[in-house]
Amino acid sequence: MKHLVVIPLAFVVALCVGCGSDDDNKDTGGGSAVDAAVAADGGSSATDSGSAAADSGSTASDSGSAATDTGAGKPDSGGHGGAPKAPTTYKFTSVSEKGPGCYSGPPTHKCDCAVAEADCKGTWTDTCPCGPSSVSHGGQTARHVLIAEMKTYLTDLTAEIKKDPDTYGKGGVVKDGINFFFLFDASVAGDQPFKLSTTPETMQKTWNDLSAPNLKGKIAGNDAKGQHKEWKTEDTLQGWKLWAAGDLKTPEGLYNKWVGMIDDLAVSHAKGEAPQDPAGKDITKVFVNSAGHDLQQLLQKYLLGAIAFSQGADDYLDDDTDGKGLKCDNTKPYTKGDKTYPYTALEHAWDEGKGYFGSSDDYNDYTDDELAGKSDTKKNYFDTDGDGKIDLKTEYNFGHCLNAAKRDRGSQADSKTDYSKAIFDAFLQGRFIISSAKGALSADAAKDLAAQRDIIVSNWEKAIAATVVHYINDVLADMATIGTDTYSFYDHAKHWGELKGFGLSFQFSRFSPMKDDFVKFHDLVGDAPVLGTASADDQAAYIKALKDARALLGKAYGFADKNVENW
């Protein structure tokens, strides 16, 4: 659940002696040039209607052991007693000086340093931080959009094949279409518009407006420095056994395997040779095969793990490699060529981890209903600054951050979780620790930062695991209707694809509590759903296997039994 914090007028003074770390350095950050107000000790907080605090849960240790099911709880001020707490929105600036400006007050906690005092609609103050934003994760936002656009491409594909079967019947066309996103080349397509739309309209219209990365360069193994496994070594990737001769058994190899399967299906559909479902009817969705693989869901959910979670947990937030993640420099501005950036390498690494989680800058101001798409008044985005546009870098929620809120929303009244708030609070607190250091972190500050990382990675993975539990429950419900008029083959395939795709994510974090049981879990889940064509005994055996897999997750992550049964 989200909690809207009411805070007094005090400001973070963050000296960001900037640095960047990867391909989105040209993005100097989104949002207005303003630092958020910080809560003084003892500041009161008001919860959103219907929300329940879950502040009593313990955090996971560095070994990845499970915390209690109530989430990691609200991080404190970093272990320094009366020290100020982090801001409530993800706004950090690159100057130490304060100046006159107009403070908006809650919920946005912004300063406008350009407005005249006579025109100030809020509170005029001499303590506004008025430098440029030191937050930059345009590359991560762009990759979220690339993954979303790939899914949209597959949604539209069946209709496109019907329009032009001759073209799609040649083979390779769909593979190239999907690889447009995976291998994205800004020199060729940077000025092209993307399809993602909002109301009001998005601030960014083309790929170059976001940043210009691709997905290939960041899938596990292709950005190898700092990864806890040699992912390019065959058979390091686990959880999938349906390989053919010549398949490369790596994270990128699995992507290529599934893309090839979709391309083959597209050719079959174009030639009027669609595969059939268990009832003997032609399958109408080009990304679904007769085995029950929904390859759209498998691809999207897998990429969120093999790219977003892998990069977040095993790269930008890790501390096992010098010069990477939490071991980045925090003492000087980052320079690349003749350009200097308004953040340090450590600030930027932390921000990129937040970017892969996918949350907006004011994530805590959303309710779980809103993030779950169950609100009529607010969606997974909001024009927070009132400029009539949605900034995808700061005002839109992507990927795993949405599922964290969905699982919080679906947790039972006496076993509430708050993974979403625990994660975002820790991102805020961690960034505050980094910015407040004004240079190299002390040993205590580094320890405090690692503690916030533990909260993030533990609760992020718990949210993924809870989502896998959710889809196990959906598959069990689907199987219960086999042979009835209410059974849906497409729902069954979709739910299993989401279960399997998300379930492959656990291997991409060295902190995972599923390390010892990962192979066992996927042996139970298998490589395809068990459909109505299977015998009654085989269906019963698979139902038991899914329940056993669900129990493994419940034990590993410390989930309450009621949540495991009802998510």
Image: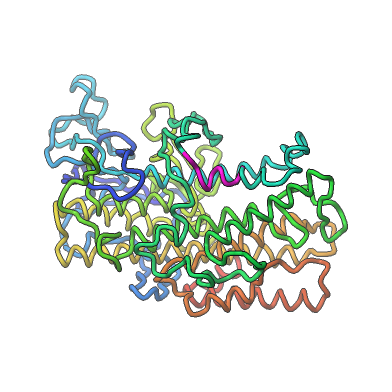
Residue 320 in picture, x, y percent from top left = 30, 68
Residue 3 in picture, x, y percent from top left = 38, 51
Comparing 303 with 3, the one in front is 303
Can residue 421 be seen by looking at this rendering? Answer: yes
| Magenta span contains residue 281 | no
**Horizontal side, residue 82 vs residue 251: left or right:** left
Q: Quadrant of the C terminus?
A: bottom right
Instruction: Classify 349 as above or below 108.
Output: below
Comparing 23 with 498, the one in front is 23
Can residue 418 be seen by looking at this rendering? Answer: no
**Horizontal side, residue 42 vs residue 275: left or right:** left
Give the residue at x 51% y 55%: 304
Q: Main secondary structure of the magenta part?
A: helix
Comparing 25 with 393, the one in front is 25
Give the magenta part as a residue range: 177-185
Residue 129 in picture, x, y percent from top left = 18, 37
